[in-house]
Image (cartoon, grey):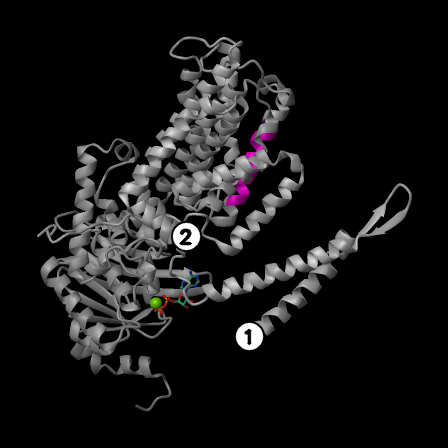
Amino acid sequence: MTPLKHILRSIMISIWFMFLTFPLMVVYINPLNYTVTWRWKNMIMVGIGTFFASFFWRRFQNRTVGNNDKPSLGQKTLNHIYTSPEISRMLLGVLILFTLSFPFIFSTYQTNVFTTALMYVVLGLGLNIVVGLAGLLDLGYVAFYAVGAYSYALLNHHFGVGFWVALPLGALVAAFFGILLGIPVLRLRGDYLAIVTLGFGEIIRLILENWDKVFFGPSGISNISRPAFFGVELVEKSIPHAIKYMYYLVLLLVLFTIFFVNRLKNSRIGRAWIALREDEIACQAMGINKMRTKLTAFALGATWAGMVGVIFAAKTTFINPASFTFMESAIILSIVVLGGMGSIPGVILGAFFLVLLPEYFRTLGDYRMLAFGASMVIMMVFRPQGLISHIRTKYNFNAKEPLA
Amino acid sequence: MNVILDVKNLTMDFGGVRALNRLDLDIRAGEIVALIGPNGAGKTTFFNCITGIYNPTGGDILVTPPQKKTVRVNGVKPHIVTRMGLARTFQNIRLFQNMTVLENIMIGRHCRTQSEILGALIRGPKTRAEEEHIVHYSYALLKKIGLERQVNEFAKNLPYGDQRRLEIARAMATDPFLLLLDEPAAGLNPQETTDLVDLIHKIRTEDKISILLIEHDMKLVMTLSDRIFVMDYGKKIAQGTPGEIRNNPVVIKAYLGEDSDA
Ligand SMILES: Nc1ncnc2c1ncn2[C@@H]1O[C@H](COP(=O)(O)OP(=O)(O)O)[C@@H](O)[C@H]1O
Ligand SMILES: [Mg+2]
């Protein structure tokens, strides 16, 4: 196409958009005094905006057509960073220093927000095992998060069980629920699995909400103990300390999770998960026990959600069913999809993106959700593989012959 | 020679369609056997029944692994059948597209290795040794089929012929005593077909693996096979050596149609 044709197309599109958005952007009815205001300026803005957007988009597409499979410049730089040990070591050093000193540089509020983001990193990495690696679309992930949180809250409320005992217990209970749900449900595939897990998430929330006698209903459970510091209870007065402590605790969990998932990805089980995602029938024909492999992924994902659940209860010291809605599952899933299925750095980036941005743009009110939706759509158009697509391990065979 | 696969009276119904009709077939150790027949004859269904993907409606599938007792495998789960030593490829290539060539073969080692989640986390000496074994074993197989230069390439980026070969190597990685190949030469050019014939010969003589293959390329079938089974409409219509099959009027009729006067 010639540039002139491009411009004409863009003009057509912008006219079309001006027409489409006319009732919404231009006509403004004041319900109090029944007057109509015509905001023509908005229409011009929409026109100019769409013109440039469509023009540049098409230019962009033209450039990318033909080298579809070649990595983009950004991807190349990333690959370079991954593979060059000096750069990655330096970056890692800076990152570690930054994260370690974070609570001392920034305010308590910032630390708290950052802790939340880190919790979502762990949740994302946990769900990444289920969705990203094993390819099981789980829309009820939040249920296991709730199981963990309520395990700790109830144990603490009734028996005064401390955080450190509850952490493995909550993880175990969540894993148990994962297996319990997984056995009947994992026979299903794709969309069916998604629907059933979505239902399971809602069932758990409804039980929490309505079974007052056991779960205290919508009013929730309060006064949950914060974690003790090597057996020393942190007194209520030193909340900033507790927040700092919580930050480091979650950071530790993040590091452990990254370490673990990274090892899993390149292990016998991790490869089986990926193979399962790629082709179930071929996978079975290669001698992989489908049910068992799926179940391990599902239960392991649940375990991680359970752990974060316990931490969540300890961090907020109050939980109620409102924290475990479908929206939560949707956000965690978005983290995995947006970040890049199966990619650890991708999920981390995705978590920060989806937790920090809405937090810092609180002033925008409900427009945040609009921006959230728009950014998801844009992502799916331009980078369906996520921010950072996952990279498989490369093996190096030198002149030395293996298995001569 | 002892019989390693003995199929008797095998029947498979899909609703009203009888895809396999009282089929008998046997393979002896060290043989290369071909299963031929027109499209829709039920050849792939036969493979699916033997490898546990379908549970046959009737009949017996008896498998005798080397130095082991005979087992009836009707309705046994696919991964168990593979563990027993039957490995297969698919008519429509089913590689793990977004995994590397080496990883595809490494998956084949899954059923011959043990390490679990805890092993992956701790990565002790046993797990590391096993991992090293998997990598080296797979690489050796890769060299055998001549794909060692594409070791880190995604499976989906391989040319068609290489994908077919990779699928065979992946099946070999499971240590089978019987290899089932579903149309391995489909879509290959003459050179690739020649290479494939060499590879299959090598697998039989060097690795001592018996082979059952479905194939339409008659030249390949005639040069490779010790014996040939011919199916049509789910039934066995003939069996014998290549010489016998070539001149069998029933086979010629099935292939060329009723009305042909050839
Ligand atoms: N899963 C199935 N459901 C119903 N019919 C099937 C199924 N698989 C195969 N068939 C039928 O069985 C017959 C044999 O098919 P197939 O084994 O693929 O033939 P071939 O491999 O010899 O070309 C065909 O009529 C096919 O439609
Ligand atoms: Mg077929």
Q: Which amino acid does label 2 sit on?
A: Gly
Residue A204 among those drawn in magenta: yes
- Alpha carbons under labels 1 and 2: distance apart: 28 Å
Residue B231 at x, y = what percent? 30, 71
Residue B50 pos. (x, y %)? 29, 57
Question: Measuring 36% from the left and 84% from the top, which residue is drawn there?
Answer: B258
Is residue A279 visible in the rendered structure shown here?
A: no
Q: Magenta segment, which residues?
A: A194-207
- Judge from the rendering whether residue A97 lies leftward or rightward of residue A45; answer left or right: left
Residue A81 percent across, percent down from the top left: 33, 46
The chain letter for the residue carrying disc 1 is A
Q: Is residue A236 left or right of residue B250?
A: right
Locate ligand 2 by image quadrant. Answer: bottom left
Residue that badge 2 annotates: A74
Q: Does the residue labelled 2 lie within 8 Å of ligand 2?
A: no
Q: Quadrant of residue A179?
A: top left
Q: In the image, is residue A58 above or below residue A212? A: below
Amino acid type, mark 1: Thr
Above-or-below relation of B83 to B247: above
**Nearest to N terminus: mark 1 or mark 2:** 1
| Residue A31 falls left or right of residue B161 | right
Q: Which residue is drawn at 63% across and 40% down?
A: A368
Question: What x and y, as percent, mark residue A169?
Answer: 42, 21
Disc 1 and disc 2 in contact, CB within 8 angstroms: no
Helix, strand or loop at disc 1? loop
Count of numbered circles in the view: 2
Q: Are marks 1 and 2 on the same chain?
A: yes
Q: Name the residue under label 1.
A: A2
Which quarter of the rendering shows the N terminus of chain A? Answer: bottom right
Residue closest to the eye, B123 or B50: B123
Q: Is residue A247 shown left or right of residue A85? A: right
